[in-house]
Amino acid sequence: MIETERLILRPFESGDAAEVERLAGSYEVALNTLSIPHPYPAGAAAEWIAESTKTFEEGGKMINFAIIVRETGELAGSIGLVLRPEHDMAEIGYWIGVPHWNRGYATEAARAIVDYGFRERNLNRIYAGHFVRNPSSGRVMQKLGMEFEGRQRQSIKKWDDYVDVDYYAILRSEWEAQRR
């Protein structure tokens, strides 16, 4: 579990499934994420949570946290790392449910997960990509001190659309410099 000023990042629990389906299944969230379907199939969140829990407990290559609003106990979204331990790096991914947009939760959770990646996982590099049509996600990456590394044009096919993706990264040395 990771705690921030306003959030708690914890492993997903089976009781989160209905809320994951409701929040992640919204068109606006699914539109801007690589692997979230729309409509979200009934029961798929429970399967995803079970797999995430198993991977998390086994210390596997994927770590997902539920983003919980400390004050209300509400599930606001998800954040995680896809680890590439052979290269001491990871890709960060996140989504925030529409009712929780524009409150700074993505930035707060992402800052905590970047700290976790460098401190607890001893990573050297954390990177992320966002669909160009979702500049809010890019602003989160910029607030973390991530450097723009480039755009891959039409590199992802989301539904019937080819989507441009901007990539950002932060190195351990840059993260350490921010801490000084």
Image (cartoon, grey):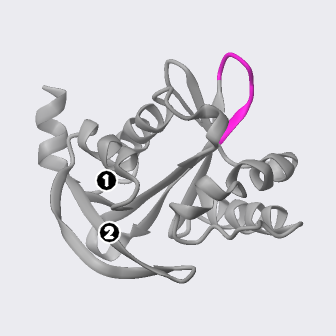
Whole-percent x, y for residue 32 in the image: 51, 60
Res. 124 in view: no
Image height of 61 relative to 97, above or below: below
Check if mark 1's residue and mark 2's residue have beta carbons within 8 Å: no
* Residue 60 visible, this orientation: yes
Does residue 87 appear left or right of residue 109 in this picture? left
Earlier residue among tags 1 and 2: 1
Q: Which residues are magenta?
A: 70-76
Residue name at image x 83 percent, y 53 percent: 17
- How many numbered discs sit on the rendered protein? 2
- The quarter holding residue 45 reads bottom right
Front position in the image: 142 or 101:
101
Residue occupying the point 39% across, 48% down: 137
The three-letter code of the residue at mark 1 reads Asn
Q: Quadrant of residue 87?
A: bottom left
Q: Amino acid at mark 2?
A: Val
Q: Quadrant of the N terminus?
A: top right
- Residue carrying label 1: 122
Residue 91 on the magenta span: no
> x, y percentage for residue 28?
60, 54
Q: Nearer the viewer, mark 1 or mark 2?
A: 2
Q: Secondary structure at mark 1?
A: loop
Helix, strand or loop for the magenta stretch, by majority: loop
